[in-house]
Image (cartoon, rainbow, N blue to C red):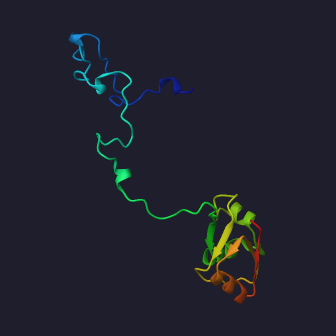
Amino acid sequence: MSFLHRIRPAPGSVRTRKRVGRGNASGKGNTAGRGTKGAQSRSGYRLRPGFAGGNLPIHLRYPKRGFTPPNRIEYAIINVGRLQTLVNKYKWQEVTPEVLYTCGAIRKKNLPIKILGEGHWEAPIVVRAHAFSQKAREKILAAGGKPEVLSP
């Protein structure tokens, strides 16, 4: 038999809603706990995010610095040391973006992949990626492997 019909919140975990504006005897009558006059006592009042009471907001006080290039390419990066552990674990003959995605080494499938040179590399296999750092390329070639650049 299912006990779903008996499920209840823990006692005291759910408070009853405070009913305001229901007469003076309720304790929240008259101004309903909003005080008297001013924007905050009116219905529809909303304080704009970042409003600092008429002062210049903090996000406008800080100086603007730096530059973000509009044509920047964001890569999913992976180091050769991490690749080596994956090659040892899965016994790959070649490394491709599809293989890296299926094993969970990269999270976003549509990002181009860049191989970086941190770590130890000893597998003489073909590594296919969209970009390689100079150090990663040297390590793969030194081990007898072949870094192949894919078009983005």
Q: Residue at x 29, y 40 (%)?
A: 54
Looking at the rendered image, the quarter that the N terminus falls into is top right
Q: Residue at x 29, y 11 (%)?
A: 22
Q: In this view, does 121 lie to the left or right of 99?
A: left
Vertical placement of residue 86 versus 27, above or below: below
| Residue 83 visible in the shown view | yes
Looking at the rendered image, the quarter that the C terminus falls into is bottom right
Query: Where in the figure is residue 62, as x and y percent of width and height?
Result: 36, 57
Q: Which residue is drawn at 22% across and 21% down?
A: 36
Residue 76: quarter of image = bottom right
Vertical placement of residue 59 versus 103, above or below: above
Work out whether residue 129 or residue 44 is closer to the camera in this orientation and state it.
44
Query: Where in the figure is residue 63, as x and y percent of width and height?
Result: 38, 59
Work out whether residue 131 or residue 23 is closer to the camera in this orientation and state it.
131
Q: Is residue 112 left or right of residue 2?
A: right
Residue 81: quarter of image = bottom right
Query: Where in the figure is residue 53, as x and y percent of width and height?
Result: 28, 40
Vertical placement of residue 123 versus 98, above or below: below
Query: Where in the figure is residue 136, as x and y percent of width and height?
Result: 65, 81
